[in-house]
Amino acid sequence: MKSVTIQPHQPGPGTDTPVLAVQELGKSYPSRKGDVLAVRSIDFAVHAGQFVSVVGPSGCGKTTLMMCIAGLLPITTGSVMFRGDRMSGPRDGVAVVFQDYSRSLFPWLTVEKNVALPLRDRGLPRTEIRDRVRESLEMVGLAHAAALHPWQLSGGMQQRVAIARGLAVRPEMLIMDEPFASVDAQTRASLEDLLLKVWAETGTTVLFVTHDIDEAVYLSDRVVVLSQGPSVVVEDLPVELERPRDQIATKQTALFGELRENVYSLVMASQRRTSLSGDAH
């Protein structure tokens, strides 16, 4: 089997022009009683090679925010800039991995054909499609499953197929919306470490949405904390844990515990403020 040829990547905060700049982003939805604001005035940036996670209370608009950033939902106010250009819809250079792997894969297609699907839409030569599919499946440890169908795989393996499909387009930025929320704890830990390995090998910038605070701290260079909806950025915390990360050793450090407590306190404080505000009315 041919090995994957990749350039080593040293992840870090980056000092160049941001790959992604979210500027005063707001999103509202129409209703019979008037517009309902989901997110308001969101500001943050992500530099090349960074791994940035977004956390917040349940229902705060994390998925809405990610859909807007990916160009899958129109924004109401503000802007999303990718490499200095305003995004007004999906674009090359950005790939998305969704939470529900069972609905994002086509059960009648083999693993290989699922991964190849976005490449065929780009009109690439067959040989290049074949090479990219093989390399992406090798990265996630599924080269042996290329001829199988999604229904023949476990949930964790199906999500690895979804990740491989995102990697196959060789994105500059990978947006992931709670991709490990539907798998068991052991599989989640395995997928987290696989993602960190692939990230380090490829240099892909990652924007990762999760409701799991431990996961956000473990994976990230930074954690962006959102308030209860309509959400704003409460804090943008640097995570200065040493890399490579380890599921046991990293989580036993004092710094990991401090960061987890800090993020948890920010999320809970936002929920309490919203509850008190609601009681006052």
Image (tube, rainbow, N blue to C red):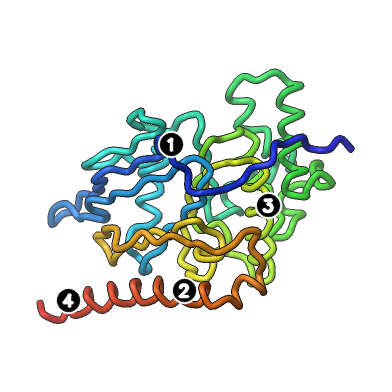
Q: Amino acid at mark 4?
A: Gly
Q: Check contact, mark 3 vs mark 2: CB within 8 A.
A: no
| Residue drawn at x 81%, y 44% as measured from the top left | 143
Q: Amino acid at mark 3?
A: Lys
Q: Residues within 10 Å of mark 1 (few under 14, many from 20)?
A: few
Q: Residues within 10 Å of mark 3 (few under 14, many from 20)?
A: some
**Inter-mark Cα distance, 2 to 4:** 27 Å
Among numbered discs 3 and 2, the one appearing first in the sequence: 3
Give the number of the disc on residue 260: 2
The answer to whether residue 268 of the structure is visible from this angle is: yes
Q: Amino acid at mark 2?
A: Arg
Q: Which residue is mark 1?
A: 16
Q: Is residue 169 above or below residue 206?
A: above
Badge nearest the viewer, 4 or 3: 3
**Inter-mark Cα distance, 2 to 1:** 28 Å
Q: Amino acid at mark 1?
A: Asp
Give the number of the disc on residue 278: 4
Question: Looking at the picture, how far across and down is residue 226, in whole percent?
Answer: 33, 62
Among numbered discs 4 and 3, the one appearing first in the sequence: 3
Q: Which residue is mark 3?
A: 197
Q: Quadrant of the N terminus?
A: top right
In the visual, does 170 lie left or right of 110? left
Q: Residues within 10 Å of mark 4 (few under 14, many from 20)?
A: few
Q: Which is more toward the observer, 143 or 241?
A: 241
**Which SS class for mark 2?**
helix
In the visual, does 20 lie left or right of 281? right
